[in-house]
Image (spheres, coloured by chain):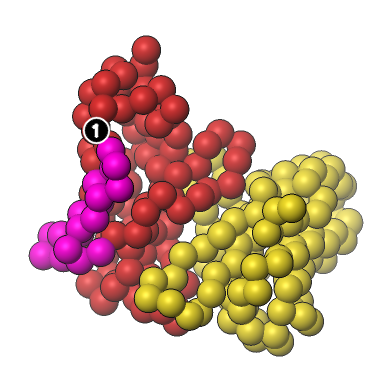
Chain colours: A red, B yellow
Amino acid sequence: RKEVEQDPGPFNVPEGATVAFNCTYSNSASQSFFWYRQDCRKEPKLLMSVYSSGNEDGRFTAQLNRASQYISLLIRDSKLSDSATYLCGGSMNRDDKIIFGKGTRLHILP
Amino acid sequence: DADVTQTPRNRITKTGKRIMLECSQTKGHDRMYWYRQDPGLGLRLIYYSFDVKDINKGEISDGYSVSRQAQAKFSLSLESAIPNQTALYFCATSNSLGSMETQYFGPGTRLLVL
């Protein structure tokens, strides 16, 4: 089983809708989690870190569920510009590498 | 100017050729990484370095080698390229200081091995 797994999608969502996707991780020792966004043919860029208490940045909310070993990303009032691939990643600690999932493709439809 | 740069951005080479991909950063970060990305396979770590002269194998290091002679530079070599090394290659950096470690990626190098 891969350490970090995501539904590859694509998620096709109408503009203005709310969309959520999860990322599961197998290593219970993982401590740090991240969501990255990758536009087509571009490099991944950090969208937000995921804290134990959850965090929110505008229309984006990230949460961590340690009991079930998954992190989630919620996008409210989706925009056409939100269309991208969203990669989740996790690492055990500051001195460890990040393991990335394969990404979830999101298409926002006009 | 970009903080993390990669050269070349695109490269076509033939099977058996030696090729080097370069990564430079001006972020002052101590940690650097090389990934490859293939459709449907996501980002896979090839090698990483936490400091000058420090080299660690990643998930798929076979067929690759790296060199970290200076903090700002991390080069990836394919000693004898083969077609299944055709991929998009990303370099990334991170800073070991701070409460959460995040990575900053270069723009990528598209490599085609014929």
Q: Is residue B72 magenta?
A: no
Decide if residue B20 is on the left or right side of residue B108.
right
Residue at the top extreme, as displayed: A110
Tell me which corner region of the image, top left, top right, bottom left or bottom right, holds residue A13. Answer: top left
Q: Amino acid at mark 1?
A: Arg
Residue that appears at 77% across and 80% down: B70
Write down the region rendered in magenta. A51-68
One can see residue B29 in this view? yes
A69 to B32, vertically: above or below: above
Residue with the mark numbered 1 = A76
Name the one closer to the observer, B2 or B67. B2
Note whether residue B65 is visible.
no
Q: Residue at x 43, y 57 (%)?
A: A100
Q: Quadrant of residue A25?
A: bottom left
Graded by Cα atoms within 10 Å as few (under 14), some (14 to 19) or many (20 or more), the crowding at tag 1 reads: some
What is the number of callouts on the image? 1
Q: Position of residue A12 (x, y in %)?
A: 32, 22
Q: Nearer the viewer, residue B5 or B53?
A: B5
